[in-house]
């Protein structure tokens, strides 16, 4: 499957707007300094990863120095993805922007893994998903040095709703649930029996508070903690594993001396090993805080979990195959051990 022409057309149509609205960064090139930009605040794991990488690079054998831009001062996460494609920024930590390539919705695919151990094996350093994603990213002039984890997403119910869905689709009937604004988000929760409402994250708290929606999906424990005042239960479906990319512009990367590429990759690998431990600890710590706050945290039984998995494997995975192609989905089924 080839999507390059569609991506190129979209990128071309955005060029003028990007030029006028985004901060100007120097064109990526093999120089003694290079930009690393990420859009999250200094409490986010993206910042911790960036700072550790800078330290690792300084203590290694590289002659290069990092010009670090946190907190979105060179644009939000979507624009950083675009600027790295264009070569204006050589390196970023950001999420996959499926606006530019719909195959990047693969990051949302359900039940590839269901535990931190299996997540690290699949998405972590040396895991197979980096190669899968690079098959897509290379069409966009990008290379992923690794994957940054955030945590498992599950379902949470607002205060006063009085429902705790654990059997799908039966228990989900009539429940309006916020999903991420992607076609895959709607597809998943429609198949699980909910009434799916696509909505940006910025609108979710107020919508739960006002009862516009009854529940939210795609919620990692740290986000549930942030919205704890309007929530009453957290059902650990663990239906997807949230993660982001450590991206470099391919032309810039290939222009580097081999010694510098190796030094940068080594610094990134050392950082990733530490970040995976850090992310798991954060996810587990916030789950304890959510429970201690009084939110009802519910584990699915093995039978309930398998039933939810079977629904996604039967409906969502063939849907994704239409987007990414049979070859990639064959790789995904092997990774997830699905016959």
Image: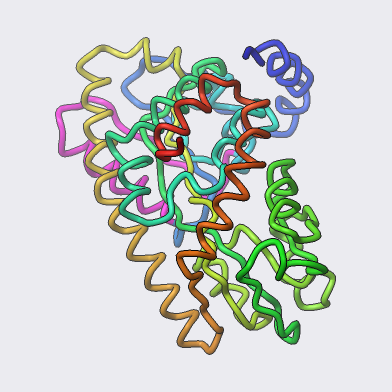
Residue 139 position, x and y percent, is: 55, 15
Residue 312 position, x and y percent, is: 61, 47
Which residue is located at x 63 percent, y 12 percent?
2
The answer to whether any part of residue 70 appears in the image is no
The verdict on residue 62 being magenta is yes
> In terms of depth relative to the viewer, which is nearer, 255 or 139?
139
Which residue is located at x 68 percent, y 81 percent?
230
When the figure is inspected, residue 298 is found, relative to residue 162, above or below; the finding is above
Q: Quadrant of the N terminus?
A: top right
Quarter of the rendering containing residue 250: top left
Q: How many marks?
A: 0
Which residue is located at x 41 percent, y 51 percent?
47
The way the protein has been coloured in the rendering is rainbow
Quarter of the rendering containing residue 239: bottom right
Q: Quadrant of the C terminus?
A: top left
> In terms of depth relative to the viewer, which is nearer, 167 or 207?
167
Residue 86 position, x and y percent, is: 58, 19
Direction from residue 158 to residue 314 in the image, left or right: left
> In terms of depth relative to the viewer, which is nearer, 283 or 192?
192
Residue 266 position, x and y percent, is: 22, 31
The stretch in magenta equals 45-74
Direction from residue 284 to residue 160 in the image, left or right: right
When the figure is inspected, residue 42 is found, relative to residue 149, above or below; the finding is below
Which residue is located at x 48 percent, y 19 percent?
135
The verdict on residue 195 being magenta is no
């Amino acid at each position: 499957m080839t999507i390059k022409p569609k991506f190129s057309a979209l990128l071309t149509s955005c060029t003028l707007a990007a030029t006028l609205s985004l901060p100007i960064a120097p064109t990526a090139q093999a120089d003694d300094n290079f930009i690393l930009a990420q859009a999250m605040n200094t409490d986010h794991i993206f910042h911790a990863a960036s700072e550790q990488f800078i330290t690792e690079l300084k203590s290694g054998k590289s002659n290069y120095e990092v010009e670090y831009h946190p907190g979105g001062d060179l644009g939000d996460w979507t624009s950083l993805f675009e600027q790295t494609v264009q070569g204006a920024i050589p390196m970023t930590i950001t999420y996959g922007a499926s606006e530019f390539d719909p195959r990047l919705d693969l990051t949302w695919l359900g039940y590839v893994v269901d535990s931190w151990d299996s997540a690290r094996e699949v998405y972590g350093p040396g895991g197979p998903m980096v190669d899968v994603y690079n098959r897509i990213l290379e069409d966009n002039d990008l290379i992923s040095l690794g994957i940054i984890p955030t945590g498992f997403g599950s379902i949470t119910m607002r205060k006063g709703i009085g429902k705790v869905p654990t059997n799908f689709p039966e228990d989900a009937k009539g429940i309006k649930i916020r999903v991420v604004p992607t076609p895959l988000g709607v597809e998943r929760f429609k198949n699980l029996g909910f009434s799916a409402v696509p909505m940006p994250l910025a609108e979710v708290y107020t919508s739960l508070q006002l009862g516009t929606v009854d529940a939210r999906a795609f919620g990692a424990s740290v986000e549930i903690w942030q919205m704890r005042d309007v929530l009453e239960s957290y059902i650990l479906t663990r239906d997807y594993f949230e993660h982001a990319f450590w991206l470099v512009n391919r032309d810039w990367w290939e222009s580097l001396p081999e010694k510098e590429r190796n030094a940068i990759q080594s610094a990134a690998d050392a950082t990733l090993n530490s970040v995976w431990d850090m992310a798991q600890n954060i996810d587990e710590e916030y789950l304890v805080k959510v429970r201690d706050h009084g939110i009802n945290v519910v584990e699915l039984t093995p039978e309930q979990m398998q039933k939810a998995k079977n629904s996604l494997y039967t409906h969502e995975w063939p849907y994704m195959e239409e987007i990414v192609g049979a070859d990639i989905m064959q790789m995904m089924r092997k990774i997830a051990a699905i016959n």
